[in-house]
Image (spheres, rainbow, N blue to C red):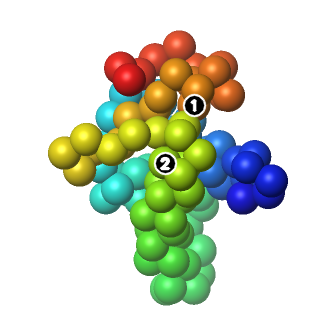
């Protein structure tokens, strides 16, 4: 996070959450892993998956997503930031 502006990885997570309306952290992790080519390092996919929680936490701290019942949804400010028309919150 740089001066309150989302990083490229945070924007990617926000885009995934907005495009799917709602995602759990586990679902977000699966989408983040699927968006990348398979690596030869066996720890690559688990490392990307572990980032999902941190990315969501930072986006929540910036008020771009909100969590309800273990599910993340984009907020109006998050949707405005990336120009996404979907999302319920």
Residue 6 appears in the rendering: yes
Which corner quadrant of the image does residue 67 belong to?
top left
Q: Residue furthest top?
A: 85
Q: Quadrant of the C terminus?
A: top left
Horizontal side of 5 relative to 54 (left or right) equals right
Q: Quadrant of residue 2?
A: bottom right
Marks 2 and 1 close (CB-CB < 8 Å): no
- Location of residue 39 in the rendering, given as x and y in whole percent from the top left corner: 59, 74
For label 1, the residue is 78
The residue singled out by tag 2 in the image is 60
Task: Give the secondary structure at mark 2.
Answer: helix
Residue 10 is situated, as x and y percent measured from the top left of the image, at 62, 51
Who's the residue at 75% across and 46% down the image?
5
Query: In this rendering, does residue 34 appear at all?
Result: no
Residue that appears at 51% across and 77% down: 47
For label 1, count other residues whose C-alpha is less than 10 Å away and answer few (under 14), some (14-19) or many (20+): many
9 is higher (above) or lower (below) than 85? below
Give me the disc on residue 2.
none
Q: Is residue 25 above or below residue 38?
A: above
Q: Along the polypeptide, which appears first: circle 2 or circle 1?
A: 2
């Amino acid at each position: 996070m740089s001066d309150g502006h989302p990083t490229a990885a945070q924007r990617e997570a926000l885009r995934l959450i907005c495009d799917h309306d709602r995602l759990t952290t586990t679902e977000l992790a699966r989408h983040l892993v699927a968006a990348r080519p398979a690596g030869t390092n066996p720890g690559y996919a688990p490392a990307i998956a572990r980032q999902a929680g941190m990315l969501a936490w930072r986006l929540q701290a910036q008020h771009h997503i909100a969590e309800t019942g273990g599910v993340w949804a984009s907020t109006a400010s998050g949707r405005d930031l990336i120009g996404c028309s979907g999302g319920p919150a």
